[in-house]
Image (cartoon, rainbow, N blue to C red):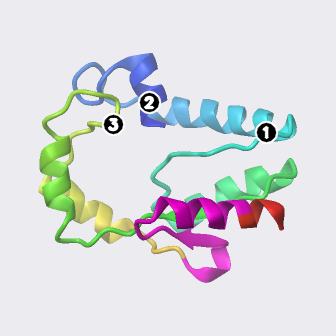
Amino acid sequence: MDEEVHRLHGRYGVDYPEWERPVVAAIRQRLVKELQAGNDVVLDHGLWRRSERDSWRQAARVVGGHPLVVHLPADRDELPRRLTERNRREDANALTVTPEALDDFFARFDIPTEDEDVIVHTGSIDVLLAMLTSERQS
């Protein structure tokens, strides 16, 4: 998602104030089109709220997709370190996040539950790929 916003509009908070909503709508249309064509799709988007994940899952299921959430948990104490590093960059994934914004994000985040068809990725890319392959074949 961030890459598409950056490609179309530049850096959030620098080149534009808020352009995410129209990009999200365009990405949803593209997701549906790709799934209808029988393609696998990876959606790289925050989806912090369960209701947002449910909405995207429904959009995929309507056209025959098999949605799966990959949760990348991070320790709350680790995030400020990562954000300090990220906030120095100027690429598409370098949206500046203040400590206050991080607190807000954390407060709004609904941890995915087992009933959401979720894979929890804890570090091994080989394990994640094996899990995704297994899900795709089922």
The answer to which of 18 and 132 lies nearer the viewer is 132
Quadrant in which the C terminus appears:
bottom right
What residue sits 60% from the left and 71% below the top?
118
Q: What numbered label is drawn on residue 65?
A: none
Is the Cβ of the residue at disc 3 closer than 8 Å to that at disc 2? yes
Across and down, in percent, residue 67 comes to 71, 58
Does 114 lie within the magenta span? yes
Residue that carries the numbered disc 1 in the rendered image: 39
Give the amino acid at mark 2.
Glu
How crowded pointer 3 is (Cα within 10 Å; few <14, some 14-19, many 20+) is rated as some
Q: First in sequence, mark 1 or 2: give its number.
A: 2
Q: Quadrant of residue 88?
A: top left
Residue that carries the numbered disc 3 in the rendered image: 93
Residue that carries the numbered disc 2 in the rendered image: 3
What residue sits 48% from the left and 67% below the top?
121
> Compared to 136, does 117 lie above or below?
below
Q: First in sequence, mark 3 or 2: give its number.
A: 2
* Cα gap from disc 1 to disc 3, whole angstroms: 25 Å
Across and down, in percent, residue 36 comes to 86, 38
Magenta-drawn segment: 113-133
